[in-house]
């Protein structure tokens, strides 16, 4: 005997080609509270998780590049590090988005969706490069002195090196850009790349 409950999470209609994760059930439970918009909220929550994963990749690579081959001596190095890291994150995000956020979107070929996803991402990357290149060094010079007392709590005796402000500014500029670009990417991909999804 089967019973239905109004509070039951959204039915699992993920095609066999979609990925399944331990996060699926909690996401569906949260999304089910949004009534008619539940499926869209489920997609947004999945997209946000993919975005957080991309952010970890993004920040990790920027940090690694700054400490190794691209120290931010000028704004251009900060912008280049941001673009390299973002590109790797975009590739990861595409696969997760295609197979976990929109697994039912198959009216376009893999190549075509990848191309569309890259165009949307390239617009976001262009914005990010310009913003980080222009804002990283000024933000670092303004915000590092404000953050220094908090940094010293975690690292007593910390003395900033000559590029510390630039590195800090790059991460702050990157963080701001990521928030703006996340919303751009979600809506542009939802209504263009994956507009075949109901």
Image (cartoon, grey):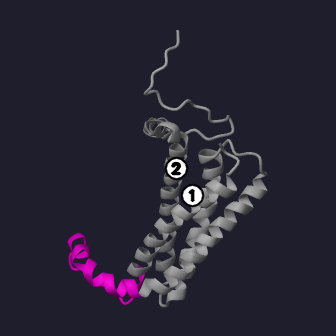
Q: Which residue is mark 1?
A: 186
Crowd rating for badge 2 (residues with CA inside 10 Å; few <14, some 14–19, many 20+): some
- The magenta segment is 138-167
Q: Residue furthest top?
A: 1
State the residue in front, 45 or 37: 37
Locate residue 99, reporting x and y percent. Answer: 64, 46
Please tell me whether residue 151 belongs to the stretch shown in magenta.
Answer: yes
User: Which label was assigned to residue 44?
Assistant: 2
Instruction: Tell me if residue 78 comes above or below residue 108 in the rendering.
Output: below
Q: Secondary structure at mark 1?
A: helix
Res 69 visible: no
Q: Secondary structure at mark 2?
A: helix
Q: Disc 2 versus disc 1: distance between alpha carbons?
A: 8 Å
Which quadrant would the C terminus be assigned to in this image?
top right
User: Which label was assigned to residue 102?
Assistant: none
Residue at point 62%, 36% (across, down): 14
Locate residue 140, reporting x and y percent. Answer: 37, 84
State the residue in front, 74 or 126: 126
Locate residue 61, reporting x and y percent. Answer: 52, 69
Crowd rating for badge 1 (residues with CA inside 10 Å; few <14, some 14–19, many 20+): many
State the residue in front, 33 or 86: 33
Image quadrant of residue 121?
A: bottom right
State the residue in front, 128 or 154: 128
Residue at point 74%, 45% (across, down): 106
Name the side, left or right, on which 160 lies relative to 75. left
Residue at point 53%, 60% (across, down): 54
């Amino acid at each position: 005997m089967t019973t239905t409950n109004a509070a039951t999470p959204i039915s699992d209609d993920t095609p066999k080609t979609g990925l399944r994760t331990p996060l699926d059930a909690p996401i569906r439970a949260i999304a089910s509270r949004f009534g008619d918009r539940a499926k869209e909220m489920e997609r947004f929550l999945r997209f946000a998780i993919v975005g957080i994963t991309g952010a970890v990749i993004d920040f990790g690579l920027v940090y690694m590049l700054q400490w190794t081959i691209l120290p931010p001596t000028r704004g251009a190095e900060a912008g280049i590090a941001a673009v390299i890291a973002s590109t790797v994150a975009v590739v990861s995000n595409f696969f997760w988005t295609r197979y976990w956020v929109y697994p039912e979107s198959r009216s376009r070929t893999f190549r075509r969706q990848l191309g569309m996803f890259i165009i949307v991402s390239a617009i976001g990357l262009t914005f990010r490069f310009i913003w980080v290149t222009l804002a990283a060094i000024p933000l670092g010079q303004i915000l590092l002195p404000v953050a220094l007392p908090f940094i010293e709590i975690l690292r007593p005796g910390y003395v900033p090196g000559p590029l510390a402000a630039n590195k800090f500014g790059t991460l702050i500029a990157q963080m701001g850009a990521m928030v703006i670009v996340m919303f751009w990417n979600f809506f542009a991909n939802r209504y263009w790349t994956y507009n075949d999804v109901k």
